[in-house]
Amino acid sequence: MADIVTLTLNPSIDTSTSVDRVAPIYKLRCGAPHRDPGGGGINVARVAIRFGADVEALCAGGGVTGELLRRLIDRAGIPNRIIQVSDETRESFTMFENATEHEYRFVLPGPQLHEEE
């Protein structure tokens, strides 16, 4: 067992990108997206690993976004145990506006965990 185990009940797929200017109605042509596994415990695990800690991330994950979460966590080199849940893992979206250097964060709701999960 790892020295540190983090728990993330509501992890997310954190997607970030940039655009020249945010404007209503128009299609906004974004830069290439960057995706990271997110959620408090996963973020802590990532940083702790950078400092050489022995860490395992325990989190809930479900649906198509849960599979993406698993791939992103593995790609980040975070030892993990993902508990399968029936609802989709949440997503968050961050948009950086180049013209003003403002950041806009959109966080979708997470899954409803059922008693058996």
Image (cartoon, rainbow, N blue to C red):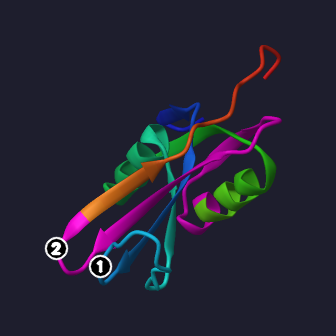
Determine the residue located farthest toward the top in the rendered image.
115
Task: Please say whether residue 79 is one of the residues in the magenta stretch.
Answer: yes
Which residue corresponds to the image point at 71% horizontal and 55% vertical from the top-left? 65
Quarter assignment of residue 71: bottom right
Task: Please say whether residue 34 is one of the residues in the magenta stretch.
Answer: no
Residues at circles 1 and 2 in contact by the CB criterion of under 8 Å: yes
Distance from Cα at disc 1 to Cα at disc 2? 8 Å
- SS of the residue under disc 2: loop
Q: Amino acid at mark 1?
A: Arg
Quarter assignment of residue 77: bottom right
Q: Which residue is mark 2?
A: 100
Left or right, 57 with respect to 28, comes to: right
Q: Which residue is mark 1?
A: 21
Quadrant position of the N terminus in the picture? top right
Image location of residue 38, percent across then percent down: 49, 51
Specify the segment rendered in magenta: 73-102
- SS of the residue under disc 1: loop
Determine the residue located farthest toward the left in the rendered image.
100
Left or right, 32 with respect to 21, comes to: right
Q: Residues within 10 Å of mark 2 (few under 14, many from 20)?
A: few
What numbered label is drawn on residue 68?
none
Left or right, 51 with respect to 117, comes to: left
Image location of residue 46, percent across then percent down: 42, 54
Left or right, 52 with respect to 41, comes to: left
Q: Nearer the viewer, residue 28 or 54?
A: 28
Image location of residue 74, percent across then percent down: 63, 62
Q: Nearer the viewer, residue 97 or 82?
A: 97
Decide: is 104 above or below 101: above
Q: Nearer the viewer, residue 60 or 113?
A: 113
Q: Amino acid at mark 2?
A: Thr
